Image: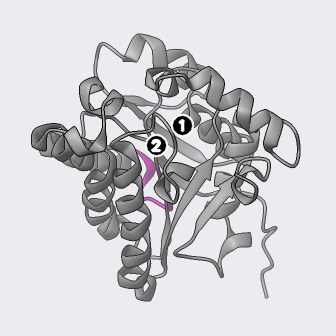
Amino acid sequence: MTISFPFSLAGKRGLILGVANEHSIAAGCARAAHGLGAQLVLSCVSDKAMQYAAPVALELQAPLLPCDVEQEFELEQLVREAAAQLGGLDFVVHSIAWAPAEDLHGRVTDSSSSGFLRAMNISCHSFARLARLCEPHMADGGSLITMSYLGAAEAVANYGVMGPVKSALESLVRYMAVELGPKGIRVHAMSPGPIPTRAASGLAEFDSLMRHAEEKAPLRRLVTLDEIGNLAAFLVGDGAAGMTGQTIYIDAGYHIVN
């Protein structure tokens, strides 16, 4: 009988979407997976964004491909190219979220139909489309990870339209876990606490949100990119083979006291 070390990703092949720069959550996940031996393909949102994401790809010696998930053909091309370069896929990390500023900063009650739909398409439904495209390349099973936030379960000040969108994403995870489970494909949402990323900087009064989390979290600190990456690496590895369909908080315990 062959026994594999549960916290090694040697031989695992992964696609990680949403690398914005070295401080992005996707970059933290990529560094952790690479450090444990995984082969990776990374993506960023556009050709213009590649200059900021390129240092991460260079550090990890991983291919970097542009992909705007609003363009169906770009998502199809990304998955096809990643699977071809890696010889298949064992895990995918979806770290993508966006909403128009006017809808993000305003009342949910006043959100526009077009803004709400775009936010839902990019931040939520793209995960379902990604799963559908990756499924044929996961013949031996695999893992799909996406990123949520506490605002999915609670009304967090200044999180606006992203709250309902992330709530839908967490529900999507549960349904996908049921549908893909018979094929050995596990699905999770991770819910990190607030950390200073480029995406988070678009939220109003985000500095106050981070200070409040640091003061109230049981560990009295914010989590780090490395810690978030380590959790993602664990979830896509063999050590988490018995887990699926969960939203897993990594926020220094903030969600239990907020």
**Left or right placement of residue 144 versus residue 179 in this view:** right
- Write the start and end of the magenta stretch as one range: 85-93
**Quadrant including the N terminus:** bottom right
Q: Tell me what residue is drawn at x 30 percent, y 69 percent.
A: 136
Q: Tell me what residue is drawn at x 74 percent, y 49 percent.
A: 254
Q: Tell me what residue is drawn at x 57 percent, y 27 percent.
A: 61
Q: Do the residues labelled 2 and 1 touch (CB within 8 Å)?
A: yes
Q: Residue 95 carries which label?
A: 2
Most foreground residue, 106 or 136 = 106
**Left or right placement of residue 249 versus residue 85 in this view:** right
Q: Residue 222 carries which label?
A: none
Most foreground residue, 38 or 126 = 126
Horizontal and vertical percent for residue 137?
35, 65
Estimate how packed mark 2 is, as few (under 14), some (14 to 19) or many (20 or more) residues with alpha carbons within 10 Å: many
Q: In which quarter of the image is residue 235?
A: bottom right
Horizontal and vertical percent for residue 197?
56, 24
Label 1: which residue? 26
* Three-letter amino acid code of the residue under disc 1: Ala
Which of the two discs, 2 and 1, labels the residue nearer the N terminus?
Answer: 1
Horizontal and vertical percent for residue 65?
35, 30
Most foreground residue, 122 or 222 = 222
- Residue 92 belongs to magenta span: yes
Q: What element carries label 2?
A: loop
**Left or right placement of residue 222 versus residue 174 in this view:** right
